[in-house]
Image (cartoon, rainbow, N blue to C red):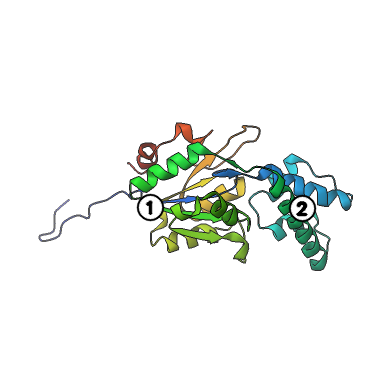
Amino acid sequence: MKKLKGVSPKKFSAPVFKGAIFDVDGVIIDTAHIHYLSWNKVFIKYGIEFTQADFKKKIDGKPRINGAVTIMPDATAKQIQAVCDEKQKVFQTLLAKEKVKVFLSTVKFIKELKKNNIKLALASSSRNSIPILKRLGLYDIFDAEVEGANLKIGKPHPEIFLLAVKKLKLKPENCIVFEDAQLGIDAAKNAKIKCVAVNRDLTHILRGADITIHNFKEFTFKKAKAMFEV
């Protein structure tokens, strides 16, 4: 092929790792068991059998109202709101009694990212996650937050992660999402963002992520950076 004078071919430059977006529950802290117990206590009153598998598949990763509608599709909007309000009261009562588990390997990894000038965002569907992080003294590490409960459309819609990217003033191709729920992984991929799935208990299969890890003891900044190398 003949080269045109004065025209140089465009050089391809691979995206660079600049931002990390974290789901909270199941990734940084563990209150999933408290959420399950809260939902279960409420659903029992309505004669609904509700298992751990139901929680993981139908509620985990969704805003509260969306989760309730999934379990009670024939309920009125007023009934759904009442169920959600009751669940939140039960959750707050149980939370006051239970100690919140913090995944220290995740916190260590987050601090490693911070040290390497990676921008950090929180993106959680739960209204409870941010107050818990503030209480634990972990909130100020992050540069931005998006509370999924305030959005019109929940995961697997990509809005929550695209908004996080926007708040970090980055592009989707420069970020990684860290998620432990299938809906969150789907949302990340719908946003065209690389995704690391965190599958701690290995009792369920998570599909579609670029990488799946058991915990952050096996994942480092160097490995995250390598995801962008061509």
Element on which disc 2 rests: helix
Answer with left or right where residue 154 lies relative to residue 219: right
Between circles 2 and 1, the one closer to the viewer is 2
Answer with left or right where residue 150 lies relative to residue 211: right
- Quarter-wise, where is residue 154 in the image? bottom right
Residue tagged 2: 90
**In front here: 160 or 134?**
134
Q: Which residue type carries mark 2?
A: Val
Q: Please provide percent x and percent y for residue 63.
A: 66, 58
Quadrant location, the C terminus: top left
Element on which disc 1 rests: helix
Asked if labels 1 and 2 touch by Cβ distance under 8 angstroms, the answer is no
Answer with left or right where residue 205 lies relative to residue 123: right
Residue tagged 1: 174
Q: Which mark is residue 27?
A: none
- Quarter-wise, where is residue 128 in the image? bottom right
Give me the residue at 76% from left, 59% from top: 84
**In front here: 93 or 46?**
93
Label 2 or label 1, whichever comes before in sequence order: 2
Q: Which residue type carries mark 1?
A: Asn
